[in-house]
């Protein structure tokens, strides 16, 4: 401890991490949190099945969330969708199982036959759900025997791009993105010139700059309501304003869609799911980056 400071007081209560699943048998909400801090809650009470089965599946789901097997929300979301499909199927049976020990070989065979396993979605529904249920020691042995039967994988319809095709895609994505970026820079310079008063008020150039300013602040052109109640853009006669409006609505969006494509191809980093990446929350005002994120 230095002369200018003092010891910090310790917290009165120990740190407790938010539980993935409560210990009470009635708790059926599972919270999956990734290492990046992204969180998603899954309410098993919404599944169309008896409460004991909801709790059993929630426990199995929570175990996967805490074991480190699922490193992204995409995995847990996919499993959740397959469990909803399973719940819908079980609820349609004459005698739906109340819990995992009540599952029968006939029920699981019917579940397999009801899925279009020649397609990837149907195949995943069967494989993902049975992989989750196998972790429950109460699962009957006869059901495990049905699960152990081989299920042919669906034929892959896609093929990998050869090096020449890959280079063409990369070049096209860069051209499209660069075209949008250049338009953003061009209109940003024009907007700064308008704000600095470099155009004569009332001229077409001035109206073009005013439209850019309104688009930058509101994302749309101003509108007015005529006597008959129809809404029109105020700059109907300004061809330049219509041009910038179409650029902002179409060209920017189309071009910027190629940004993640270019980024993935250039960085070649597939270890992190794209939707889990953290995007900047702000950008310096008046910069090209500010227009980009807006």
Image (cartoon, grey):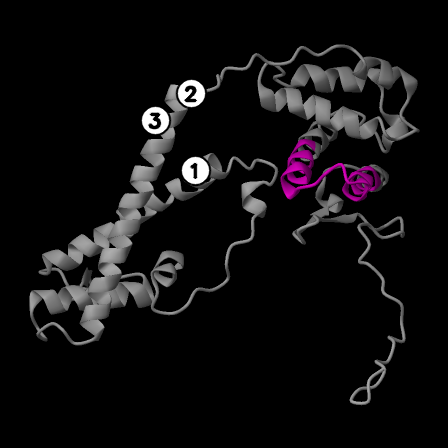
Q: Give the number of the disc on residue 159.
A: none
User: In front: 188, or 232?
Assistant: 188
Q: Earlier in the sequence, mark 3 or mark 1?
A: 3
The stretch drawn in magenta includes residue 75: yes
Q: Earlier in the sequence, mark 2 or mark 1?
A: 2
Which residue is under mark 3? 168
Seen at 82% across and 85% down, the residue is 2
CB under 8 Å between discs 2 and 3? no
Which residue is under mark 2? 163
Residue at disc 3, secondary structure: helix
The stretch drawn in magenta includes residue 237: no
Between disc 2 and disc 1, the foreground one is 2
Instruction: Name the dominant secondary structure of the magenta segment.
Output: helix
Is 264 on the left-hand or right-hand side of 180?
A: right
Compared to residue 240, the image places residue 85 above or below, namely above
Q: Residue 259, how many percent across, how many down?
A: 40, 43
Residue at disc 2, secondary structure: helix
Q: Quadrant of the C terminus?
A: bottom left
State which region is magenta.
58-82
**10 Å neighbourhood of mark 1: few (<14), some, or many (≥20)?**
some
Q: Give the number of the disc on residue 261.
A: 1
> Can residue 184 be seen by looking at this rendering?
yes
Seen at 70% across and 41% down, the residue is 71
Q: Residue 72, how many percent across, how many down?
A: 66, 42
User: In front: 180, or 138?
Assistant: 180
**10 Å neighbourhood of mark 3: few (<14), some, or many (≥20)?**
few
């Amino acid at each position: 401890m230095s002369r200018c400071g003092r010891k910090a007081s310790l917290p009165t209560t120990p740190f407790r991490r938010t539980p993935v699943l409560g210990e009470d048998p009635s708790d059926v909400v599972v919270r999956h949190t990734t290492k990046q801090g992204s969180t998603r809650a899954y309410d098993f009470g919404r599944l169309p099945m008896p409460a004991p089965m909801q709790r059993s599946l929630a426990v199995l789901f929570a175990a996967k969330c805490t074991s480190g097997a699922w490193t992204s929300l995409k995995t847990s979301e996919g499993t959740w969708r397959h469990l909803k499909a399973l719940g819908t199927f079980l609820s349609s049976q004459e005698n739906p199982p109340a819990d995992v020990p009540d599952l029968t070989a006939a029920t699981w065979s019917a579940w397999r036959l009801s899925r279009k396993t020649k397609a990837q979605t149907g195949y995943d529904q069967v494989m993902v759900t049975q992989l989750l249920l196998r972790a429950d020691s109460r699962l009957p042995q006869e059901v495990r025997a049905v699960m152990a039967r081989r299920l042919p994988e669906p034929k892959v319809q896609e093929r990998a791009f050869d090096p020449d095709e890959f280079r063409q895609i990369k070049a096209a994505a860069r051209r499209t993105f660069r075209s949008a970026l250049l338009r953003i820079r061009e209109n940003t310079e024009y907007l700064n010139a308008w704000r600095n008063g470099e155009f004569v008020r009332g001229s077409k150039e001035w109206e073009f700059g005013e439209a850019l300013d309104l688009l930058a602040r509101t994302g749309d052109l101003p509108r007015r309501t005529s006597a008959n109640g129809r809404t029109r853009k105020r700059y109907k006669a300004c061809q330049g304003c219509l041009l910038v409006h179409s650029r902002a609505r179409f060209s920017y969006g189309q071009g910027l869609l190629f940004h993640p494509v270019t980024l993935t191809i250039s960085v070649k980093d597939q270890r992190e799911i794209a939707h889990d990446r953290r995007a900047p929350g702000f950008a310096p005002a008046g910069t090209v980056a500010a227009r980009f994120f807006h």
